[in-house]
Image: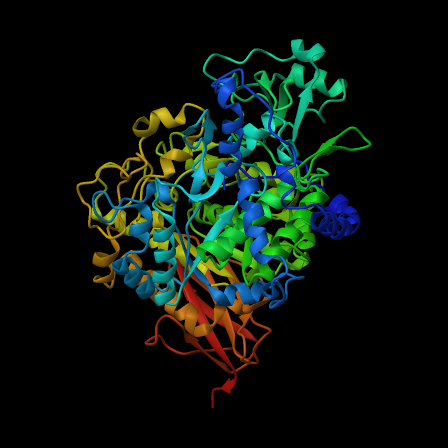
Amino acid sequence: MQGSKQPANASGHELATRTRCAKRMLWGAVVVIHALSWTALATAAPAAAASAANAPTAADAHAYIRWLETRSMLHQAAALARRYSGNSIQWQHPYGEPQPRAAVARASVWFTAYPASTIAVTPGASVLATLADERLWRAFEAIGIQGIHTGPMKRSGGVRGRAYTPSVDGNFDRISFEIDPAFGTEAQYKAMVAAAAHHGAVVIGDIIPGHTGKGADFRLAERAYADYPGIYHMVSIEPADWALLPPVPAGQDAVNLSPAAVDELQSKGYIVGQLHSGIFYAPGVKETDWSATDVVRGVDGIRRRWVYLHYFKQGQPTLNWLDPSFAAERLVIGDAVDELGVLGDRMVRLDANGLLGIERNRSGRVQWAGHPLSITANQLIADMVRKLDGFTFEELALPLDVMKEMSRGGPDLTYDFVTRPAYDHALLTGDAEFLRLLFQLMKQYDIDPVRLIHALQNHDELTMGISHFGPHAQDMFPFRGGQLTGEQLRELVRREMYDRLIGESAPYNLKFGEGVASTTATVAAAALGIRDLNALPPSDVERIKRLHLLLAFYNAMQPGVFAVSGWDLVGALTLPADAVRQRLGDGDTRWINRGAYDLLGTNPAATRSAAGLPRAVALYGALPRQLEDPDSFTSRLARILKARAELHLSTARLIDLPPVRARGLFVVVHQLPDSADIEVTAINFADRPVSESVPLHAAPPGSKCTDALDSQAATLEVSPDGTLPLVLQGYEGKALRIKVGDKGG
């Protein structure tokens, strides 16, 4: 995931009314893809060609085109497709509808890796060799981890001439199906898959359906070769209008367009116009989502300048999901087949998958985020993955009504961007009312928590877009005894979080987009009012650990997937901005929350990862040592996950949200699978004790209640008035199992 994947202009009502028509496009797409030959990309014979920059000589132009073609993803996808076309493997698994419970049952606890932050197990060892290490998998199994999401590990960046250029966005600019040599080899990847399987776990990979890097596919598109221009949202500008395009600076291959230039090109009918996305906005660097190439001579001898769309950085050209060639679909489906059929992944992430359609509608508004074409495209990708016995998940913040519509098709699981800012707000303010409101809205929109991936930290910022309240800005919501509009509520929550998370209160965190670059440990530190993280005394480390475990408890003790990162497991703090100053040049402050970590503690001399990220301060230390200490973060997390597994909570159903009086109290009730029993998750996000009787309608009076985490705790009983007495200390959570039908005598 990169940037703030927060759709700015999605209308839930509009999507719901347009989706039925959009889904009909799916079957037309399938027919067209079937009719178009995967080998059609070789139909245009390459002619002598040269680029205005970094060009091969005319004499070897033909060889250069062939060099690019054999390294292109579209070419690799064609070869993979031939292995599956006409093969019975396509007809072994149901695929037409999402299967969230089957996906969760495959792996309900994930470790989310970030390759660039992984310190090698020994000096010189690769990231993949490290992630395949038997000692690491023994530790993972002891914790209760059932899957590893690797993050993007394929070659990324670009191609200039015959030289590869580095990634501009943490390998989210894929240019090949090959494993990035910086991380290891395909054989090592498969060894990691085997190591995971040996410990009863699976590997979860990535596909990026919205864009690529500037690799062979883009260079062939610039040269107007075969179907390659159809991959991208790019338009050839007539020479008579080149005056509208600024010159490309020396040493660069493109130039970002000004808002005025975009408006002029739109008025001439070239492009849809400004998106006003704000993603990676930086004055003088990225002022719009459109850039122009230099002059490039095509294989047909024609000199062209192209204008192309990029939601993210200039080196990430956007794919065109509705081009007559269906080249983008062929490329992305090929990537998914490679993840499952070649590498051995059992699930894949769809990154930024809500940005797959764009148009200027009849009212003149540019619709881009949450476009109905995105729903159609997601259905196509997810169906193919399920057809090959895989599952998919999306990592995109969406309004609840859009989430509901997308749950009818497409990915099996989705990242929990719904409650993530809300539970952090509860911790920071000691007030869980906003979190309780979000759960009421989830119930209203019939959002099943089992579809959600409840994660602690990932490589991105703490997203605070609070997406539902954008398109519902004028709707009224009850809050703190009054009524606020969606806009007022969103601004209030953001202000309260910013006041505590950045600036004077917590100078170690930095703002990024609509969120905050932070680690879970530094969120906990901010909630405790700790301003200086240098030389923390043991007492403060314990306080941070207590809050960190409370957030882990919240995410684990509900249906769905629980995900934990390497930064969480070692208790990483943010990096000082000066330590990654060069990486912050384009305004991407997230690098401070991506410090390097040594999970096994076997390479203590390493000060940086192989990717050059400085080692972060790790409050909790390496996993083996933590697992020897019953009071460590990891050992206590393992006990939480053991209780979760024994309850089979990952596939339970949310059935009640009891009203509460205490500001910091949050209570949810779950129906356990294959049992009449229910589970109550109760959390006190405030620092003061809570004693309150909570109404419980799912269990009859007299029902016995035991603590799932503490076998020595006194047995509770549902009172004659149908309430459950709860006593929680400050920052405490309890998981209580109620034996329905088992009453006291």
Q: Residue at x 36, y 44 (%)?
A: 115
* Of the pair 596 and 156, the residue shown nearer to us: 156
Question: Residue lying farthest right?
Answer: 362
Q: In this picture, is 271 found above or below 661?
A: above
Q: Residue at x 33, y 65 (%)?
A: 141
* Of the pair 292 and 71, the residue shown nearer to us: 71
Describe the colour scheme in one phrase.
rainbow
Measuring from the top left, give residue 471's x and y in whole percent.
69, 40
Is residue 76 at least partly visible in the picture? yes
Question: Residue lying farthest left?
Answer: 605
Q: How many marks?
A: 0
* Of the pair 587 and 706, the residue shown nearer to us: 587
Residue 134: quarter of image = bottom left
Measuring from the top left, give residue 17's x and y in whole percent.
79, 48
Q: In this picture, is 351 found above or below 699?
A: above
Question: Residue lying farthest front?
Answer: 59
Residue 228: quarter of image = top right
Is residue 435 at least partly visible in the picture? no
Residue 260: quarter of image = top right
Measuring from the top left, give residue 197's x and y in whole percent.
38, 65
Measuring from the top left, give residue 210's x and y in whole percent.
59, 39
**Image check: 84 left or right of 409?**
left
